[in-house]
Each structure stands twice: as structure tokens, then as C-alpha cells.
Image (spheres, rainbow, N blue to C red):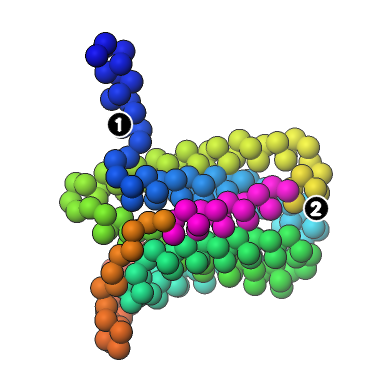
Amino acid sequence: MSRLGMWVSEIKSQAIPQGHARRTMSLATLINTFGNGLFMTVEVIYFTLIVGLSPAKVALALSIAGGVALSFSVPAGHISDRFGPRDIASLAMVLEGALMFVLLSVHTYIPFLLVNIGMGILGNISQTMRMATIAKLGEGEERVAIRAYQRAVTNFGISLGTVFAGIALAINTPIAYQLLLAGDAVTFILAGYVFRKMPYMQPTVERGEPISFQALRDKRFLGATAL
């Protein structure tokens, strides 16, 4: 093999993860974070300038939604232990997509707040399920490498979504923003479908076994989570 061929082969082996599960998870992550990049770039602009909500109300709603979503971190972990991460993550992403379509019809504050709370909770659940999946895919340095690769895919997906969101910003019409939000909804559903292709992972807690809330009694853990 030529030196160029060896170089291309090495780049390919580093860029594309080995194994069906890792490739599937990476594809789902890329699709999901691409949609996140689309949404994050235009959400505030759309709901303040197009829908007409005040910036203060939008900021308050997003802060409340973020706080409520954060409180579901521990319950989400228990859900993963009880039912396994694959199906729950897939369902959460599909439901997020459905709520994104609902968000397109929102024009007042309370529905905006409630939909964002729902999406925040589902997003937290799906993220927790993905982290639980990583924990089952490898151990030690291998797990660190998988997590680092997923972080790189996340950064790339968000950046790519931000670039495409610039098209809607340049056009700056209600329909352009609405098409972008609809596109984000589709990416959630597609990512959920792809993640469903992951191998099934057995729950670690038997049905009927009591759930421990020890993490909620750990003040250092709670402090780090809050930060």
C-alpha cells in the first residue's frame, strides 16, 4: 500500500468508529446535534421578533425549563436502570420531535413555557440514556475514548446546524424560521429511529426492586450538578 493509501486508511479508521453500536450511536448523535444547532441559533430570535414574546419572558421560560429539566437527572438515571437505555432514549427523542412541531403553533407565553419544559425534560432523559449507553459500550480508557468521540461529533453537529441556520437568518422571514424549526423536529424523530437500531442492553435493576436515592443525599454531588 502506498504512503498516501496508508494515510487515508489511518484517517478513516480514526474518523469512523469501529463496531455497529458505536457507528449507530455516532450517527444518531450527529443527526440530533445538527438539529440542536438549527434550533439554538434561531429560537430566541423567532419567538421575540416573529412571534412577539418579550425577551424577558423568553429568557425566563428557558431558565425555568432548564431548571426543571435538571431536576430530572436522577429520575432519568433510575429509568435507565429499570428499563434499559435504548428504547427510552429513542422514545424521548421522538417525543421531542413531536413537541417541536407543537412549538410551531405556539404564540403565547404559557404554552411556550410548557412546551420548553417538556422538551427540556425529554432532552435530559435522552442525554442520560446516551451516557448510560456509553457506560455499557466500554470500560476504562475505552469508555473515555468513546465519550470523547461523541463530544467531537456533538460539537461538529451543532456547528454544522448553526451554519445552516444562517440561511434562515439571512432570509429572515417567518416561513424560513418555521421551516428550520420543522427541520429540527424531523432530526429528533430521525435520530430516535436511528438510536433504536442500537443493540438492546439489559436493565441493571429488577422490576420491584426499590430505587435508591442516595445521590440526592450527597451534597457534593448536588453542588457539582447545580454548577
Q: Amino acid at mark 2?
A: Ile
Label 2–label 1 contact, CB within 8 A: no
Residue at position x 45%, y 72% from top?
71
From the image, tell me which residue sits under label 2: 50
**35 relative to 132, above or below:** above
Q: Is residue 49 magenta?
A: no
**Does the image show residue 191?**
yes
**58 relative to 77, above or below:** above
**Does the image show residue 217?**
no
Where residue 139 appears, as percent x and y from the top left, is 19, 53
Q: Nearer the viewer, residue 111 or 210?
A: 210
**199 horizontally vs 61: left or right:** left
Q: Is residue 186 magenta?
A: yes
From the image, tell me which residue sits under label 1: 13
**139 relative to 96, above or below:** above
Residue at position x 79%, y 51% from top?
49
Q: Amino acid at mark 1?
A: Ser
Tell me how far mark 2 sits from mark 1, CA to CA.
45 Å
**151 horizontally vs 204: left or right:** right
For label 1, count other residues whose C-alpha is less than 10 Å away and answer few (under 14), some (14-19) or many (20+). few
Residue at position x 44%, y 45% from top?
27
Please give the range of residues in magenta.
Answer: 179-196
**217 relative to 145, above or below:** below
